[in-house]
Amino acid sequence: MPAFARLLLSFLALFGVLLGTLPAEAAGPGRNDPPAGPARPDGPSTAWTSAEPEPLACTQARRKLWRAGEGWTVRTVTTCR
């Protein structure tokens, strides 16, 4: 282990021991805030909708279609807009 890393590690250990021995009032100003309640999910804050989706308008029609090898056939074709 490099000398700098050992020096840093020993300094941090000594600082932690000294910080742990301080009384609670000396460590920092006391806060008397009420405990926070459980976090409530408010839902997505950036979601938006440009418009309501329009219902599909589907129609069925009988069409005459030319098929190679079969000739003219009549089929039901569904078209949605």
Image: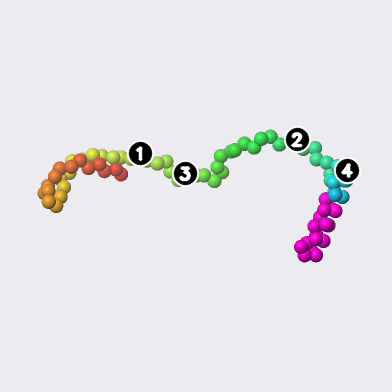
* Residue denoted by label 4: 23
Q: CA distance from mark 3 to mark 4?
A: 55 Å
Q: Are marks 3 and 2 in contact (CB under 8 Å)?
A: no
Q: CA distance from mark 3 to mark 1?
A: 16 Å
Disc 1 crowd rating (10 Å Cα; few below 14, some 14-19, many 20+) is few
**Residue 71 percent location from the top left of the image:** 11, 49
Residue sitting nearer the eye, 74 or 10: 10
Report whether 32 appears left or right of 78: right
Q: CA distance from mark 4 to mark 1?
A: 69 Å
Disc 4 crowd rating (10 Å Cα; few below 14, some 14-19, many 20+) is few
Q: Disc 1 residue type?
A: Pro
Report whether 81 appears left or right of 3: left
Q: Disc 4 residue type?
A: Pro
Would you say residue 11 sits in the magenta stretch?
A: yes
Residue sitting nearer the eye, 45 or 24: 24
Q: Closer to the camera: disc 3 or disc 2? A: 2
Q: Quadrant of the C terminus?
A: top left
Q: Disc 3 residue type?
A: Thr
Q: Earlier in the sequence, mark 4 or mark 2?
A: 4
* Residue denoted by label 2: 34
Residue sitting nearer the eye, 21 or 25: 21
Kind of element beneath mark 2: loop
Q: CA distance from mark 2 to mark 1?
A: 51 Å
Q: Closer to the camera: disc 3 or disc 4? A: 4
* Residue denoted by label 1: 55
